[in-house]
Amino acid sequence: MKQKLAGTAVAIGLLAACVSAQSTGQATGTVDGVVFTVDANGGHAVIPTARISLDGPTHIEAESDGAGKFAFNAVPPGAYTINAQAPGLASNRTIAVTAESASEIALEMKVQAVVESTTVTASTNQIDTKESSGSSTIGESAVRNMPNLNERFDSLLPLIPGVVRGPNGLINMKGAQASQNGSLLNSADVTDPATGTSALNVPIDVVSSVHVLSTPYNPEYGKFTGAVSNVETRPGSFNKFRISAQNLLPRVRRVDGSIMGIAAATPRVTVSGPLVKDRIAFTQSFEYRYERNQVYSLPPLEAWTRSENFNSYTQMDANITKKQTATASFAIFPQKFDFYGLNTFTPQESTPNLHQRGYQAYLQHRYVTDSGNLLTSQVSFRKLDADLLPNSNAPYQLLVETTKGGFFNHQDRDTTRTEWAEIFRSHPRHYFGLHELSAGANFVHSSYDGRQEFLPVQIIGVANYPLKQIQFGPTSTFSIHQNETAWFIGDKWTVSDRLTFDLGLRFDRDSVTDSVNTAPRVGFVLSLTGDGKTMLKGGAGYFYDRVPLNVPAFRYLPTRTVTELNPAGEVVGSTKYSNVISNGLQNPRSEVWNLELNREVASNFLVRVGYQQRNTVYGYFVNPIVSGSTGSLSLSNHGRDIYKEFQVTALYRIHRSTLNTSYVHSRAHGDLNDFNQFFGNDPLAVIQPNQRGRLTFDAPNRFLAWGEIAAPWKLTIAPVLDIRSGFPYSTVNQYREFVGPRNELRFPRFVSTDLQVWRRVRLPIKETHARIGFGVFNVFNRDNYRDVQNDLDSSRFGQFFNGPSRTFHGKFVLEF
């Protein structure tokens, strides 16, 4: 690994030397202009403090003044894309800069929002007439403005219709388990090779946008059966140093009206600037996070989890020549979660601590040929180690009302992933229309070296005597390796101005399943009107997932023996379960199709109506099978999930403000004994027979509204209203056996209202600003319960607990 890192350092050094050698004096031009928006009456209103960027042979950033004006000086000649962003507004266009010339630009900004499959641009047509894939984007404006309790980018994902944070705290996109979704950082995979869940930690200050693709018909995307999210980071500043600092003061913890230490300390500092002006830029962001989160139903001094993270992200951007650019990054993210999984029925002593250490190195090179073809080469290396540690050595006991003793599982996971990809995109070719061809190949090597230890578990009944005891075999160690190869071809075929097809074919080979999977895909965009304001979009395709490495490791895990006891503690029955993988392993596959209608009702009003369905087969679940005194814990590859979604989304613009609203009616149904809930980061001790039913994050009805409002006195107000059905849950008895169909009951309706207000002010120091404001979370102090007593034998059966209270956060950001 040291050799790889050294090689990356040498490569960056060579880039710097190459650029330095080419940094000779040349004639330049200037670009200046004004940004404005058009109101309903056709009047023009200038936009102050809009962020303007110029991208081409170099990257330059500026900000519009109080009159909406901006200027770029000493711009090298070439073709550029000029982008402008303001709260809820965006614009982009291409320009050509020639030597010793002045270009004057008037940029009309139009509404920008998270509208699925709809991209708003500065052109007359506000609906993307070429892209068939279902995609949603959280842009830089939303990243900066929207209320964000944890100030992490993944906390913004629920702003997208069809994306919810499940009862286990993980993000579920488009009805899929967290392990079924893809997670990318600048197109590089950042999932945990062992569990398949996202393991991405970068400071939010470096995030430019987050894209969620629910139906990515582009064959470049693979290794998931749900949806995929791609986080894009900001490029470095090539001509000016920029520094931001925030959260410099900690928040105190109050217990019964008294200050009891620190609740949170989350300082962040980000620096960006040129190493070689207009040629090499760097970005460095540091974040330290110390946080305590309360479980409101536990005694005050025993009700807090504790986490400590340090996230560092370093990025180098290089303009090697006019046709070559490169990006290199390095991220480290050690973190500790103490009392992981703390809730009303699991006190601190009985929770584990989850400690993780990880880093990722990444290098991407982009080359544009004279004819306009683009070749992208990308390599990344990721290492993630995780330890799950009990907080006590006392015997683990599951009681009706609580849990006692130390946690029953001790894990030690060391994983790595090395990935290399080559992607070619051709310039448009004419043959019965316009063809934009793409092709690529990808190779991934993953490894998992693990150690698992399971300790005895007792189930205690209401009479306070043991009902069952679970004992495990000796500690196991194992080493799993996986090679994945993929290759694909695609064609965006523009038949006419009103019809475009996306055609793709992808092949994936996985050494774990020893199979080659073929995934054809097709999407289309049809303009129903000549003005391009009414678009019909849709498509269908196959998607194959990778196999998380804890699945082939299952056969090496300790066996278990379940013993039944009578009131005297005597054994009345015993079953020993061996770990068995039934019928071999296959790659999970989803069959996805969607259809949607987009209509630009007016220049400031967009509406989308769509339907999406995903059928997933060959999913993994575990199931205990008993035959007399022996049994097997079967890992089956016959799991099936189905997700159906009907969605109505609307976007309305009022002057320089936007309002996004959506209603989603959905159904998420499938096998309930998902592998990760028993062998993931917070495993359950008791495994009952598998059933099919509503998935734990199923929310059949959800209304979501959020906006960015430009208020008087230069205030930015960002409210969020989220109303959805409560998550389902099952009924059990004192034996921890399910009673009746699973997930038949539901939590009360979830209603959350959050608000952030801030204002950007100039400070007396030259070119120094501050953003000052506050956030309020759960404004109306509603009891959105997180826990329920679902044991029929409890006197509190059916009662809900742990509803978070209203929370206030101040906001103060320094920008130099």
Image (cartoon, helix red, strand yellow):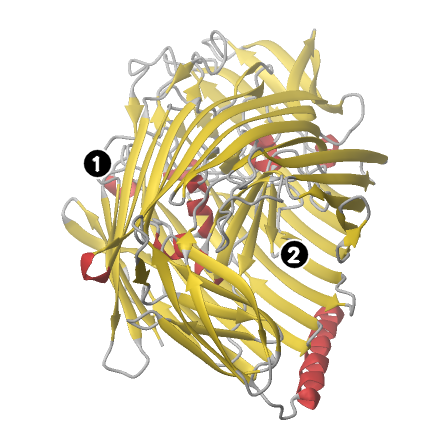
Decide if residue 229 is in sight here: yes
Q: Which residue was labeled with disc 2? A: 383
Q: Nearer the viewer, mark 1 or mark 2?
A: 1
Q: Judge whether 238 appears above or below 175 on screen.
A: below
The numbered mark, 1 or 2, whose residue comes first in the sequence reads 2
Between 596 and 526, the residue placed more toward the observer is 526
Q: Judge whether 676 appears above or below 734 on screen.
A: below
Q: Judge whether 8 appears above or below 524 on screen.
A: below
Secondary element at tag 2:
strand
Between 599 and 66, the residue placed more toward the observer is 599
Residue in the image at 62% along x and 13% along y: 574
Residue in the image at 28% along x and 70% along y: 770
Placement of the N terminus among the 4 image quadrants: bottom right
Placement of the C terminus among the 4 image quadrants: bottom left
Q: Amino acid at mark 1?
A: Asn
Q: Which residue was labeled with disc 1? A: 781
Q: Position of residue 654 (x, y in %)?
A: 30, 47
Secondary element at tag 1:
loop
Residue in the image at 62% along x and 93% along y: 25
Q: Residue furthest left?
A: 257
Decide if residue 481 is in sight here: no
Tell me if 762 is positioned left or right of 458 in this view. left
Q: Position of residue 289 (x, y in %)?
A: 40, 58
Residue in the image at 69% along x and 60% along y: 380
Q: Position of residue 3 (x, y in %)?
A: 75, 71
Residue 309 image-quadrant placement: bottom left
Between 609 and 618, the residue placed more toward the observer is 609
Tell me if 335 is positioned left or right of 384 in this view. left
Structural crowding at the residue carrying mark 2, measured as other residues with C-alpha within 10 Å and reported as few (<14), some (14–19) or many (≥20) = many
Q: Which mark is residue 629?
A: none
